Amino acid sequence: MAPGRRRHERLRWSKLYTFSCLRPTVVTDDELPHPLQGPGYSRLVHCNQPGLHQKKPLNYCTNHISTTKYNIITFLPKAIFEQFRRVANVYFLLTASLSLTPVTPFSAVSMIAPLAFVVGLSMAKEAMEDWNRFVQDMKVNSRKVSVHNGEGRFGYKHWQEIRVGDVVRVEKDQFFPADLLLLSSSYEDGICYVETMNLDGETNLKVKRSLEVTLPLDGDASFRHFASTIRCEDPNPNLYTFVGNFECEKKVYALDPGQILLRDSKLRNTTYVYGVAIFTGHDSKVMQNATESPSKRSRIEKKMDNIIYVLFTFLILISLISSIGYGVLTKFGMPHWWYLQPSATSYVYDASKPVLSGFYHLLTALILYGYLIPISLYVSIEVVKVLQATFINQDIHMRDEDTGNPAQARTSNLNEELGQVDTILSDKTGTLTCNQMDFLRCSIAGVPYGVGSSEVEIAAVKQIASEVSGTIEQHSSTQDFWEDSGDGFGSPECELEVGIARMVGKPHRPTTKGFSFEDDRLIHGNWAKEPNAGTILVFLRVLALCHTAIAEPNEKTGGFTYEAESPDEAAFLVAAREFGFEFCKRTQSSVFIRERYSPSEDPVEREFKVLNILEFNSKRKRMSVILRDEAGQIILLCKGADRFDLAPKEASFFFFFFFFPPHEPNSIILDRLSKNGRTYEIETIKHLNEYGEAGLRTLALAYRVLDESEYSAWNTEFLKAKTTIGHHREAELERVSDTIERDLILVGATAVEDKLQKGVPQCIDKLAQAGLKIWVLTGDKMETAINIGFACSLLRQGMKQICLSVDSSNILSLNKEKAAKENTLMQITDAHEMVKLEKDPNAAFALIIDGKTLTYALEDDLKNQFLSLAVNCASVICCRVSPKQKALVTRLVKEGTGKTTLAIGDGANDVGMIQEADIGVGISGVEGMQAVMASDFSISQFRFLERLLVVHGHWCYKRIAQMICYFFYKNIAFGLTIFYFEAYTGFSGQSVYDDWYMLLFNVVLTSLPVISLGVFEQDVSSEVCLQFPALYQQGPRNLFFDWYRIFGWMGNGLYSSIAIYFLSIQIFYNQAFRADGQTADMAAVGTSMFTCIVWTVNLQIVLTMSHFTWIQHLFVWGSIATWYLFLIAYGMFSPVISGNAYRILSEALGPAPIYWAATLLATLSCNSPYLVYIAFQRALNPLDHHVIQEIKHYRKDVEDQHMWKRERSKARQRTKIGFTARVDAKIRQLKRKLQKKVSSLSIQTQS
Amino acid sequence: MNSSGGSAAGPSSGSGDGSAPPRRNSKRPKYSKFTQQELPACKPILTPKWVISVFTLVGVIFVPIGIAALMASNNVVEIVDRYDTECIPASMTGDKVAYIQNDTINKICTRNLTVPKDMDQPIYVYYQLDNFYQNHRRYVKSRSDAQLRDADQANKTSGCDPEKTTKDGSPIVPCGLIAWSLFNDTYNFTLGNKNLSVNKNGISWASDRDHKFGKDVYPKNFQNGVLRGGASLDPNKPLNEQEDLIVWMRTAALPTFRKLYGKIHQDLKANDIIMVTLENNYNTYSFNGKKKLVLSTSSWLGGKNDFLGIAYLTIGGLCFFLATAFTVVYLVKPRYWVGY
């Protein structure tokens, strides 16, 4: 048997735990099994008889999962359908098919080839992506698990072969292949530990427990004759509920979520479990939770569709004009145009049927003016985005040094959307925090220990220092203080900075995970020399004893690893070990610790008998153990929340705004102190507040010595309460526990840092300065979330917190749901009122809401009120939200505000939100890859989000916006000349240009410059982007792609087309265009006109770009050169191919000065209005980046530090969250104090 | 990208990703100025200095060009004579079409042109047609370059509708509407009593004669159909010598166009009177077209057209104005550095 089994043999946890996992499993009167009738409760599972589930009516789906969009048969039709959902593609398909008929003005190949290319490319991309999904699915489906195959033997099977009813055996650290009902485990009492990180992102282990009745099913052989049935709910996405009955030997047992092992969670700390599959494959809860991943398109692309509609309308309009013109001319002119032989015409030119001819001409015109709709736009955009994505992937500044993970743009569709984000919805655990607790400080007997600084403090001091140095010192380092690695903080005059330099510059010594405590007074056994050694001893014992963790010997290091329910507890144990109190063993009745009072001594192993464990839960917010030490003394050790109490007390609802620092009456532990236990209270409270301000998670520790009689009296009562049956049990237990947890003696307090990921507060600060709103959605408890809020500066002192919380369990009303909902509404309206009444412009509100309340708030009739409240708050934190709720909140923000949302998370529980948001960002950290797989971008640390948005997002947005505008411009400028010319040809549909010119225009002559604009353009460098986060707002405000700008560009195109056309035809009117008397024919006019267009559009892009590397120069000037080269080359082809363009440049146009003069004139007159416009804009109404460009250009940043700094501080978006806001608030506070002092002084002097 | 929820929520992580780190490490981005988007770049911005100098420069360049172009155009002497209305016997003015279509009537007509200024040789003779859609799609397409070039390709008449073949199916060379409607008025000039010879050689592009119209391609079945179009061609002259056809086949861009008829290699003095004897054969009456005879000298810019010069002067002037305007703007409102 496995060693774990032996080790835990004598452990019956059920005896120790008070509340959570172990309620009586016998069916009692008031806990009747759910009737399980009617719709929604139809599932019937025959355990151990999977065969029954292979035929109707119980033919549930297999465990095979498939997430691909296509299969081999459906790929072509479906993918083609996808492609032709783009209106432009439909149009091009239409024109391509028309090009096979006589109405076409161009050759068929020139119409079909580009379309085939465009569609083919996109479809190949789709196929690649789907193939990758298929491979991924196959990997999952072919994982193996041990399955009962009858006769009491187990064999390995692929996951996909598991059917409902199969009994499976899952080993330690394996994933559950389907939703299982836990039957038994390697532990005697059928409990097992489960890690649900992939489901809800929580890393602490959950305890699951089997029914008593299935406990004997222990060992492979016992399943030989096992048979029973389960009736339960139908597949649903709710992870936290389960309703069902287990029927065995004619008895019915109620099932609850405590027995269900969900697919994708992991068995931890338990050697094996047996379970029976209830929901398989797509029926499993996690798969039900998976929302269909929407194909995302960026805002700009959606708007681009609208532009294309506008252009279509325009296209149809001019086509109508030209076909009416044609009809009229055909009717009245054609019969007289003998040179066209009107008597011998086909239907296209039939003068006797002008309407019909006009109709055919409409088709011709639609093809002819197709150049208004840029077919190469989609391809170019796709190319540009792929290249942009490559740059994102390659960015060395977004690569995690430790893991080497680069940032990854998993889809290139959304690059420009990164520049328009308005709201960030962030997961907490694993995203903002590393999910690692570090024991940082403690206060024992009123003495603070621990000199290490929390990241919050370091960053805050740095910030303040830089503000100070910014105002005092003009010539100090201009380096960005965030990027400053801490070695050179310029001005030694400033004490603050010295402090930081010390803090930051100190070399980080290798520390134990979970322990970054630094204070020589306590470690290495030095604590014994402290004056309060006795109290310190108690303190350390509380750390080492008051928990529910299990110690496992670690073979490698020879020490112990601790499996705790929460990371805090693990941190305490690690801390206790470092201090010399090593928790080494837990048995059914005792906890063993090894105490070492000085490094030289050998440790003494002490055994403490565990009498009772009064567990932690969210209502009690404290936990106690009652122990008997070796001397026989009974002690109660207690640790608990010190700060504030969010749990309802007597009132069924609670709703209040609280201001920091918290007031003592809300404290859990401090309320329960005995009179003589309050020796250190004042100091401890002071320290607790300090720790809280530093963003640390604090707990107060206390103890109490019980005398035998008191304990035994209490214990009888407690046992009675424990055996109470029914729903009063918990309340009863709580009440009894409460009676013993009194008259405590305060020992001290701990401060644990929920380790934020590197650079998170700074990143949040920068993002806030960039004008982004940040919402935190976490599955964590409210306190934890609030702590993190403080640590990240999403919350700060002086911020008014609005907590929305409804506790329906205490509602006595008959209709609980309704009452709770009404209550939620009431809270929202009140809060809203308060926000509205606030006069102080600097006042900031924070909204904190818990999952249950959110359920009501997200209902259709409340959600808008909730949203309008939330958008008025500077920061929003949602706690205890389920994955589905995360997605719902995201949808609410996305749809309610109509602005771009970005969701960032790392766990499978964030998948819904990541998919729902406009942009999903996955953190490719330690946890699974689900979030990354579902995301559009993946980064390895939260802090890279800043660069991703502020640099790449900003660039990509501007690039794509300018690129699309330019695309429309150039196609209008070109396409309309065809229209004007047509009017001069009797609307006959003749083009002045050679077919080849037109084909080349989009593909060769203008494509590369616009791609270089889309890929390489930088309005300002990346450093400047980071220094001026407010520049980012150009994206969310959509300054570069609003209708004014789009129509401006179109107008520019219109003007250019008119100018080029009419200048050209006036210049080449009818006189000789050369000294030797030849007049210009159509080829000469067309070629000259086309030359003007090539020059104009390429010069226009030069004016648009502000960043020229050799690549841009090569592309732009190369494109123009290509045009001339092409003309020469084309002119050298046989005249059968080149027609009238034969030797056109070398013979006809090249030697003609008028040709060059026309090019110069047309080009400059087309481009000068834009030049005038941008010059005026820059002079009179400059945009932010104009000013910054000029500062950089004049090297003001080097010459005039003062101004540079001032500009930078101006370039911040006004923000209410982040450090900057914190510092601002502090400054305001100081000013106010000063004013008060002054005024009181003046009053004094007056009186 | 669109990994649908399934795979996302599916247990795709797990042990399968054990091989991930080394794979990722191999993807470690390499530092290069290109990949980091830090290539050296010039970042021109429109500073006042630039704006003013650009506009001034454009003005400085454009105004002289405009003056030169205007002068060139002014030096060109041009005689334009519309004769289609005059060359109709008074009796037939009521039915011009009948007149022109009646082959029996003599179409000879005489015009006298006065030379306004001295004209230096060469003097180019053009005919100008108005309202003639040589750029109509049906017309432009109706030709076969292959056939014109190569005697072996005489059957390639696919684009030549409706003037492809004779009734018995043999191909027309040159086929198509363009050739069929060849202009057929003729001009003869006399100055005093001396004949002014019109040189019809070299009026077309050399490349057309050498490469586009074959040396060994002779007209076949031309103008033999039911409908008679324009001029006939000498079946014994290869196409590359039929320069009138070559010029005509260069379709004009606009419905009003001139085509070179010939050159007169003789200087003319002011007030010389030239007598033109012309055959008014070509039917422009059907579609109310005009016919003009043009005699013109040429400058380095070609024929007489003031437009280019005026346009250059306008733009140049405008640029000077803009340069001034911007100077004022920058003086009145210099960049306010203290904020925005």
Image: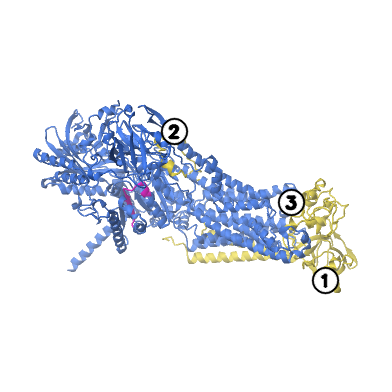
Chain colours: A blue, B yellow
Dot 1 and dot 3 within a common chain:
no
Residue A753 picture location, percent across and down: 28, 43
Residue highlighted by disc 2: A142
Helix, strand or loop at mark 3: helix
Q: How many marks?
A: 3
Dot 1 and dot 2 within a common chain:
no
Residue A454 picture location, percent across and down: 29, 44
Q: Is residue A1064 visible?
A: no
- Give the Cα distance between marks 1 and 3: 40 Å
Residue B35 lies left or right of residue A752; in this view the side is right
Magenta span contains residue A877? yes
Mark 2 crowd level (few <14, some 14–19, many ≥20, 10 Å Cα): some
Residue highlighted by disc 3: A1139
CB under 8 Å between discs 2 and 3? no
Residue A735 to residue B92: above or below: above
Q: Quadrant of residue B289?
A: bottom right
Helix, strand or loop at mark 1: helix
The magenta segment is A873-886
Residue A1063 picture location, percent across and down: 66, 62
Q: Earlier in the sequence, mark 2 or mark 3?
A: 2
Judged from this view, the residue extending furthest toward the top is A1
Residue A837 to residue B5: above or below: below
Q: Is residue B199 visible?
A: yes
Disc 2 residue type?
A: Ser
Which callout, 1 or 3, points to the residue nearer the camera?
1
Mark 1 crowd level (few <14, some 14–19, many ≥20, 10 Å Cα): few
Magenta span contains residue B263? no
Residue highlighted by disc 1: B95
Disc 1 residue type?
A: Asp
